[in-house]
């Protein structure tokens, strides 16, 4: 049986790391009959490693309006690629963290369409999803919105008021809607809690979820993927999102990198959380029964909680905190020193280019002079003989 594995998130559950891992280990996966394809088309601002984005991707027309016609065209072009790959591989793996939310917004018919296509083409759909505790998930999503979006200036409090919380956080109901179409047996639920990962590795855990094991064949590149902003640096980015120049891609990336350089120090000096202890407890109490159903029906665990419900003893973040001034100074110091080093490097390159230009000018001058003598060969011979007599060794 051919199987289409769909990794659908959720957001901020190491999705970028897993996508890059699959992309970099494409050859290893192919030896095992699995294909993690890179599509022959792309979306602006979306990594090619998010190879399942065509399932939900938005496309704008020349007027800046959503083009459902082009979205539909891209969807079926992607499925055409998938069906073609099934001629060679038994397993095709697609990943995009946006699917988890989109299936209740702009892609409400996604599972129905995919199920019909699977029945028509003779392959099975298998979904793997990582779930994070609701309070942590909500904070992670807002963190990513502020970090990645250029014009989002909403506070965390405003964010909570505007979202449709049940569609985001009622995991059991979302999974049930999916299961009603593709079957509960075709959904693999994983907890995004590092101490529960198989072998203590998100990569081993993911591979096990799609029927493989992590071996020495796989390469894991160093570095953290898509790390969030912490502490006061997140508030700085929220404020900077209101500056008109942030809409420039290069400016956005420069600001983000500068804030990331200060983020860990900020979090270490002022460890905090966006929700108070009482608010966190309220979240856990509200979703506990639904979460238990997920553990029971999708993980086949009886009498266990879906998540570790330990509440960290951290203060709720406040804008007027004692570390804000230091963090602001650190950020602008980082920006200033970075710009100084970039200018210094630019001056070095300019100086090198000027030196090369002077050498080239001398060579050009000699060539022009030689061309002059070539136009008057007898004069050049007489000049050469005279210089030999006088002992001069001058170049033509």
Image (spheres, rainbow, N blue to C red):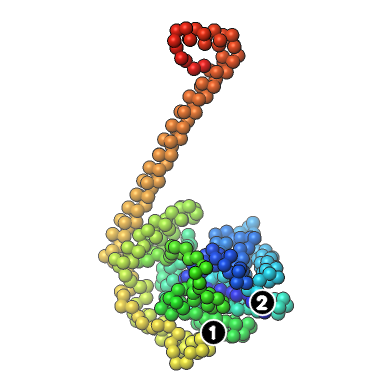
Which quadrant does the N terminus fall into? Answer: bottom right
Q: Is residue 96 visible?
A: yes
Quadrant for residue 22, please give it.
bottom right
Nearest to the observer: residue 304 or residue 238: 304
Quadrant for residue 71, please give it.
bottom right
Residue 359 lies, with reference to residue 263, above or below; the image says: above
Q: Position of residue 144 (x, y in %)?
A: 46, 67
Residue 323 lies, with reference to residue 128, above or below; the image says: above
Residue position marked by numbered label 1 in the rendering: 173
Q: Position of residue 306 (x, y in %)?
A: 45, 85
Q: Position of residue 148 (x, y in %)?
A: 47, 62
Say whether marks 2 and 1 touch (CB < 8 Å).
no
Q: Position of residue 101 (x, y in %)?
A: 54, 74
- What residue lies at 44% left-to-right and 32% top-to-bottom? 354
Q: Is residue 145 visible?
A: no
Residue position marked by numbered label 2 in the rendering: 2
Nearest to the observer: residue 378 or residue 62: 378
- Label 2 sits on a secondary structure element that is strand
Spatial CA distance of label 2 from label 1 is 28 Å
- What residue lies at 41% left-to-right and 62% top-to-bottom? 238
The crowd level at tag 1 (other Cα within 10 Å; few <14, some 14-19, many 20+) is: some
Nearest to the observer: residue 104 or residue 375: 375
- What residue lies at 73% left-to-right and 77% top-to-bottom? 120
- What residue lies at 63% left-to-right and 83% top-to-bottom? 181
Q: Earlier in the sequence, mark 2 or mark 1?
A: 2
């Amino acid at each position: 049986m051919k199987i289409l594995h769909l990794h659908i998130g959720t957001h901020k559950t190491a999705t970028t790391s897993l996508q890059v891992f699959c992309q970099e280990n494409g050859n290893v996966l192919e030896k095992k009959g699995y294909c993690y394809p890179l599509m022959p088309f792309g979306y602006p601002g979306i990594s090619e490693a998010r190879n399942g984005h065509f399932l939900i991707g938005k496309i704008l027309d020349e007027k800046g309006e959503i083009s459902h016609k082009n979205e539909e065209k891209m969807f079926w072009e992607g499925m055409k690629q998938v069906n073609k790959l099934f001629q060679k591989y038994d397993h095709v793996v697609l990943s995009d963290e946006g699917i988890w939310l989109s299936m209740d917004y702009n892609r409400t018919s996604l599972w129905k369409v995919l199920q019909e296509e699977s029945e028509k083409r003779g392959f099975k759909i298998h979904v793997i999803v990582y779930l994070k505790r609701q309070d942590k998930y909500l904070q992670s999503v807002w963190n990513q919105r502020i970090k990645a979006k250029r014009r989002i200036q909403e506070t965390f409090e405003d964010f909570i008021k505007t979202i449709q919380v049940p569609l985001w956080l009622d995991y059991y109901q979302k999974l049930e809607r999916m299961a009603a179409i593709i079957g509960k047996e075709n959904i693999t639920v994983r907890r995004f809690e590092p101490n529960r990962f198989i072998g203590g590795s998100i990569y081993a855990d993911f591979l096990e979820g799609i029927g493989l094991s992590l071996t020495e064949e796989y390469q894991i590149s160093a570095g953290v993927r898509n790390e969030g902003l912490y502490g006061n640096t997140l508030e700085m980015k929220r404020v900077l999102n209101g500056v008109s120049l942030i809409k420039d891609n290069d400016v956005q990336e420069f600001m983000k990198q500068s804030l990331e350089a200060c983020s860990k120090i900020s979090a270490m000096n002022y460890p905090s959380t966006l929700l108070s202890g009482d608010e966190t407890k309220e979240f856990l109490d509200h979703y506990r029964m639904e979460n238990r159903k997920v553990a029971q029906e999708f993980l086949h665990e009886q009498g266990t909680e879906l998540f570790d419900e330990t509440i960290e003893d951290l203060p709720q973040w406040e804008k007027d905190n004692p570390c804000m001034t230091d963090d602001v100074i650190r950020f602008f110091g980082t920006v200033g020193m970075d710009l100084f080093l970039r200018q210094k490097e630019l001056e070095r390159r300019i100086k090198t280019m000027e030196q090369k230009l002077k050498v080239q000018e001398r060579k050009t001058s000699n060539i022009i002079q030689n061309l002059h003598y070539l136009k008057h060969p007898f004069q050049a011979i007489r000049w050469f003989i005279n210089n030999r007599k006088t002992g001069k060794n001058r170049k033509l």
